[in-house]
Amino acid sequence: MRLPSSLRLKESRHFQRIRSKGVSHPGRFLVLAVLRDEETPEFLFGLITGKKIGIAVTRNRIRRLLREVIRAHRAEIQPGHHFVTIARWRSPDATLQELEQDWLRLAKRAGLLKKTHRPAPTAPNE
């Protein structure tokens, strides 16, 4: 199942607005810039993979992996957010699992993910 193109940021002015007015959270492989926008019914996302990452094949691979991470966690992302995921120079060396862990850690820190209710642990019977 693909992410619909209606969720993607396409214009450079939107990327600039998120990077300038939003809050950035740096990680090992990624930087996540988030801007709250109550008018958005779901969420909007963009990906940035600069030429420092490598050749086009490498940049496209990173973008595919990041789209997969976002697609897999689409249901967990709170509506009303615009965010940009920026690949850092270390990202070509990362596996899908490492990128996913880094993105989830940054998304939790940014308050991008829905709060899930976890039951309190019970004490073992003695």
Image: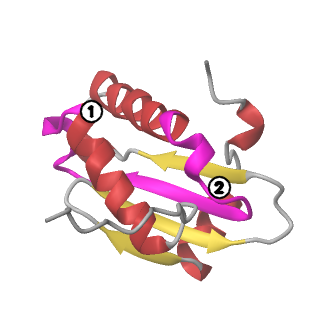
Magenta residue span: 72-95
From this view, report whether residue 15 is shown above or below residue 73: below
Label 2 Cα neighbours within 10 Å, binned few <14 / some 14-19 / many ≥20: few
Provide the residue designation for mark 1: 96
Question: Colour mode?
Answer: secondary structure
Disc 1 residue type (three-letter)? Leu
Q: Which residue does the image show at 55% across and 66% down from the upper left?
A: 115
From this view, report whether residue 94 is shown above or below residue 117: above
Label 1 Cα neighbours within 10 Å, binned few <14 / some 14-19 / many ≥20: some
- Answer with left or right where residue 75 lies relative to residue 93: right
Q: Quadrant of residue 38?
A: bottom right
- Answer with left or right where residue 115 lies relative to residue 62: right
Q: Secondary structure at mark 1?
A: helix
Q: Residue furthest front?
A: 126
Disc 2 residue type (three-letter)? Ser
Q: Which residue does the image show at 61% across and 50% down from the upper left?
A: 45
In reply to whether residue 82 is colored magenta, the answer given is yes
The percent position of residue 28, horizontal first and vertical second, equals: 19, 60
Residue 27 visible: yes
Q: CA distance from mark 1 to mark 2?
A: 27 Å
Provide the residue designation for mark 2: 12
Q: Quadrant of residue 81?
A: bottom right
Q: Which residue does the image show at 13% across and 37% down from the upper left?
A: 93
The percent position of residue 123, horizontal first and vertical second, equals: 24, 68
Q: Secondary structure at mark 2?
A: helix
In reply to whether residue 12 is colored magenta, the answer given is no
